[in-house]
Image: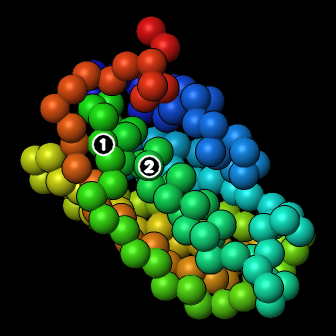
């Protein structure tokens, strides 16, 4: 390994304004994996009083971006989709766990499970990444 995946992922998180705005916390990271958490606030609810799907997607997307960028080269989402399985109420502490399923050349596939505090799956996300042809820079969390 030519870099420290954990330190690199923490730098990415520290430079991520969207994650900070949502209150997403990076719990663990490693090569091809990441775990993040978020507590559902009242302003994150939809008209039905449950967590907005966009918030669930953003949480899963954050875990995905840290996992696919953990290897060092700049990777971006090529596509992603999500299945919402259960409603989530305000005050719920959610956990999103991203796992690399495959990585070949410049392409990667990552699965993210969004979990309730009891471990039940509330959403399943699949992201497909593409590595760009440029070195990491300050905008990518690389503050060297």
Could you tell me which residue is drawn at 47 percent across and 45 percent down? 66
Which residue in the protein does label 2 denote?
65
Q: Give above or below for 11 relative to 53.
A: above
Q: In the rendered image, is residue 6 in sight?
A: no
Q: Position of residue 36 (x, y in %)?
A: 63, 53
Q: Is 110 situated left or right of 47 in this image?
A: left
Q: Quadrant of residue 50?
A: bottom right
Residue that sits furthest to the front in the current view: 47
Q: Which mark is residue 75?
A: 1
Q: Quadrant of residue 118?
A: bottom right
Could you tell me which residue is drawn at 72 percent across and 88 percent down? 87
Question: The residue tagged with tag 1: helix, strand or loop?
Answer: strand
Could you tell me which residue is drawn at 51 percent across and 32 percent down? 12
Question: The residue tagged with tag 2: helix, strand or loop?
Answer: helix
Q: Position of residue 26 (x, y in %)?
A: 64, 44
**Which quarter of the rendering shows the C terminus?**
top left
In front: 56, or 124? 56
Q: Give above or below for 79 relative to 72.
A: below
User: How many C-alpha atoms fall within 10 Å of the one at disc 1: few (<14), some, or many (≥20)?
Assistant: many
Residue that sits furthest to the left in the current view: 105
Q: Earlier in the sequence, mark 1 or mark 2?
A: 2
Q: Which mark is residue 16?
A: none
Q: Are marks 1 and 2 in contact (CB under 8 Å)?
A: yes
Q: Is 108 situated left or right of 120 in this image?
A: left
Q: Give above or below for 123 relative to 137.
A: below
In front: 101, or 109? 109
Q: Quadrant of residue 73?
A: top left
Q: Position of residue 39 (x, y in %)?
A: 81, 61
Q: Position of residue 121 (x, y in %)?
A: 61, 82
Q: How many marks?
A: 2
């Amino acid at each position: 390994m030519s870099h420290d995946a954990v330190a690199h992922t923490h730098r990415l998180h520290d430079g991520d304004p969207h994650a900070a705005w949502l209150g997403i916390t990076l719990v663990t990271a490693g090569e091809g994996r990441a775990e993040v958490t978020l507590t559902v606030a009242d302003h994150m609810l939809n008209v039905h009083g449950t967590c907005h799907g966009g918030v669930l997607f953003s949480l899963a997307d954050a875990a995905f971006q840290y996992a696919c960028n953990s290897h060092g080269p700049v990777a971006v989402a090529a596509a992603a989709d999500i299945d919402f399985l259960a409603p989530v109420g305000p005050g719920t502490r959610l956990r999103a766990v991203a796992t690399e399923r495959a990585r070949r050349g410049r392409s990667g596939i990552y699965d993210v499970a969004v979990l309730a505090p009891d471990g039940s799956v509330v959403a399943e996300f699949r992201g497909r990444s593409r590595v760009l042809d440029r070195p990491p820079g300050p905008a990518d969390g690389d503050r060297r």
